[in-house]
Amino acid sequence: MPKEHILVVEDEEDILELIRYNLAKEGYNVTTTTTGEEAIKLAESATPDLILLDLMLPGADGFEICRRLGNNPETQQIPIVMLTAKGEEADIVTGLELGADDYITKPFSPKVLIARIRAILRRIRMEPIEEEAPLTIHDLVIHPGRHEVLVNKKRADLTSTEFRLLYFLASRPGWVFTRYQIVDALHGEDYPVTDRSVDVQIVGLRKKLGDKAAKYIETVRGVGYRFRE
């Protein structure tokens, strides 16, 4: 079985080669580039299974590339893992808000990098299949097989993480989940993430659903979130 295709965007040659070597050793098909502009072209033409994106790039930085990929229907479903040198919460939250699925701080362990990439690709392979029935809540339709959300029959362009978050809550109406329970459901247990990252994803999700449908997602003070029954 052929391995998935990973696009690596990193302008530091030594780090780029380190990542390329370790991914190739695991059997992944790896494409590399040092610029954001070329990354956009490669993402559109080759449609990789995952993009590993450095934030500090010359010209258009990682935040801008993440934004552009998320706004393009052809690339918005490709999971993006950010590489950030600082690991500051502000950088992480900004990246997640722009649609990134995960982040890894530098310096990093190649073993940790591989494990995180495997987890994301495994989750994608295990997502609901086409035959699973869509969820219909008033004017909101969530189709797990198509990864499609319709609000008043109009498509809402959600990132992969936003879709999974909405599907997780909507399939369990009335249940209240803490932020860490949500993280565990979306990414697996013991996943390193800031408290604010879930709040950021909720804000982005509500915005894309529109005022009426956004009200289905309720904030439970001091606890977390639930989908209104």
Image: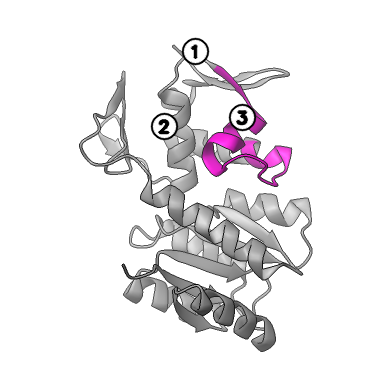
For mark 1, give the secondary structure. Answer: loop
Q: Secondary structure at mark 3?
A: helix
**In the drawing, what numbered circle is on residue 174?**
1
The residue that mark 2 highlights is: 167
* Mark pair 2, 1: CA separation: 13 Å
The number of numbered discs placed on residues in the rendered structure image is 3
Do labels 2 and 1 touch, CB within 8 Å? no
Residue in the picture at 39% in, 67% down? 4
Magenta region, residue range: 176-198
Residue 181's mark? 3
Q: How is the image coloured?
A: one colour
Q: Is residue 190 magenta?
A: yes
As rendered, which of 182 and 207 lies closer to the eye? Answer: 182
Q: Residue at x 33, y 70 (%)?
A: 2
Task: Decide: few, some or many residues near mark 2? Use Cα within 10 Å; few <14, some 14-19, many ≥20.
Answer: some
Q: Earlier in the sequence, mark 2 or mark 3?
A: 2
